[in-house]
Amino acid sequence: MANRTPMRTPERSTWLTALVWSGGFVGLLWVLEILDQVLFRQRLDGYGIRPLDTGEGLTGIVFAPLLHGGFGHLVANSVPLLVLGFLILLSGVGRWLAVTAIVWIVAGLGTWLLGGLGTLHLGASSLVFGWLVYLIVRGFFSRRPGQIALGVVVLLVYGGALWGVLPGQPGISWQGHLFGAVGGALAAYLLSRDDATKRLSPAP
């Protein structure tokens, strides 16, 4: 009797990859928070962004999105991170990494510059806002109807969260939200230009 291995369709493989990466990233955040709470007694939170601090405050640009101020903070970010990250990953791991890197850097630098002296900023909500804005606007740069339609759906579901870019909520880093959103828009613009360049480049 022949032993046949089921063939994976490209669509199924893409969905599985997106699920693994989005779930793995959120899982990493949970592991770090558990370690912080159980072993380090929240000392890891000190590696967040300290605006205009040229020492440890700058290292927070690297570490802040990986840290959270308790499980409640992480729970609030987990579902949008899973959903939005999954949607971006459907375009490929490379695209997700590029979008995330741009949002991470822009949000971190913007928060470090304008976050306010004596404050500490941490949490992956900057990525949430960056990924959200990227998904909403990328279709208008790429002029792809499917991406425009998805952007409208994402706006309808999560658009209310965009009020978080405005100041006024104590204990909420609106600067991280704002510059995360700026990073998402910048990523959509830059990566759509890169895609256009590739489409116009002659085949070798």
Image: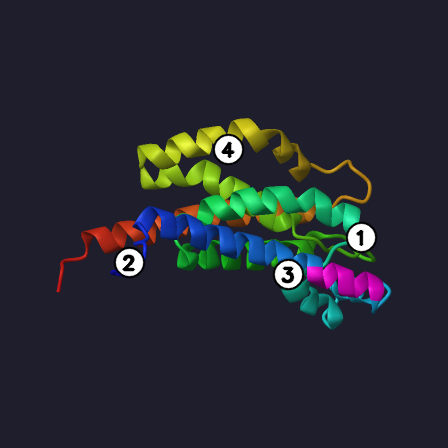
Q: Which residue is mark 4?
A: 154
Specify start and end residues of the magenta stretch as a single range: 31-38
Report the amino acid beneath label 2. Answer: Arg
Q: Which residue is mark 1?
A: 70
Quadrant housing the C terminus? bottom left
- Is 57 included in the stretch rendered in magenta? no
Of the two numbered discs 1 and 3 on the same chain, state the one appearing first in sequence: 3
Separation of marks 3 and 4 at Cα, in angstroms: 25 Å
Tally of numbered discs: 4
**183, 98: nearer the viewer:** 98
Q: Secondary structure at mark 3?
A: helix
Residue 51 visible within the image: no
Of the residues tagged 3 and 4, which is closer to the observer?
A: 3
Of the two numbered discs 3 and 4 on the same chain, state the one appearing first in sequence: 3
x and y, in percent, of residue 190 in the image: 39, 52
Separation of marks 1 and 4 at Cα, in angstroms: 27 Å
x and y, in percent, of residue 29 in the image: 67, 58
Q: Quadrant of residue 40?
A: bottom right
Which disc, if any, is residue 28?
A: 3
Relative to 53, 23 lies left or right: left
Q: Quadrant of residue 112?
A: bottom right
Of the two numbered discs 1 and 2 on the same chain, state the one appearing first in sequence: 2
Of the two numbered discs 3 and 2 on the same chain, state the one appearing first in sequence: 2
x and y, in percent, of residue 140 in the image: 37, 36
- Secondary structure character of the magenta stretch overall: helix
Local packing at callout 2 (Cα closer than 10 Å; few below 14, some 14-19, many 20+) is few
